[in-house]
Image (spheres, rainbow, N blue to C red):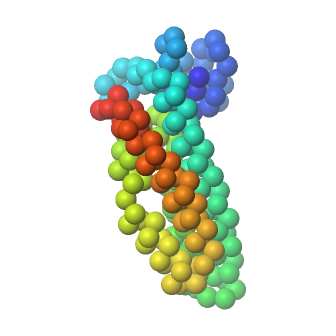
Amino acid sequence: MFCRNCGKKLEPGQRFCPDCGAGIEEIPGNQAYFNAANAQSVAMSPYQTQLLHTLSGKIKTNAVIWIVIAAVQVILGFVYNWIILVIGVLNLISCVRDLMYIKTLLVKPTGIVEKYKPLTGPIITLAYNLIFGGVIGVAGTIYYLLAIRAYVIQNEQELRQIERLYS
């Protein structure tokens, strides 16, 4: 079972999350989550819960990749070219957004498919990394396309079913 507030894995029988202190409500055989929009608990199957936590892990990995890429680009930007510095800052902003989205994903999993299915964002990121000298940013875009976007497309129907629980 996972905390509905912060996503931390919980031991059976715990009544409060040791990380954030949120109360835990158990529904036998399912994972209990709180739907803030309807002020009610939502029961997801263990498969659905695992699906969200796997996606969350992939997003965390993506964020770490972009932190490394952005750090290298910022350093290179100070040494070689200010444009690379700007690209590094843009990539860092993207990374922070990913990290903030993880909590939203685990608390209110809506709009997942609409967020990750379009190709426009990754293509723009790939283009400005290639055009302005941030070639190392290509690695982050490739990971995003092959790990996150492909996972969302592969599990689109199940993710849409989860989203319906929260609408």
| Residue 164 in sight from this viewpoint | yes
Question: Residue 79 occupies which quadrant of the picture?
Answer: bottom right
- At x 53%, y 24%, the residue is 46
In the rendered view, tell whether residue 117 sits above or below residue 5. below
x, y (%) of residue 165?
35, 28
Vertical order, 33 against 84 (above or below): above
Lateral position of residue 166 relative to residue 102, left or right: left
- 72 versus 11 height, above or below: below
Residue 57, by quadrant, is top right
**Nearer to me, 5 or 128:** 128
Figure quadrant of the N terminus: top right
Q: What percent of the width, then of the height, locates residue 10?
A: 64, 23
Q: Residue at x 59, y 79 (%)?
A: 134
**Where does residue 125 sit, x and y in percent of width and height?**
48, 71
* Quarter of the picture holding the C terminus: top left
Q: Is residue 62 placed above or below 107 in the rendered structure?
A: below
- Residue in the foreground of this view, choosing between 150 and 14: 150
Residue drawn at x 44%, y 70% is 123
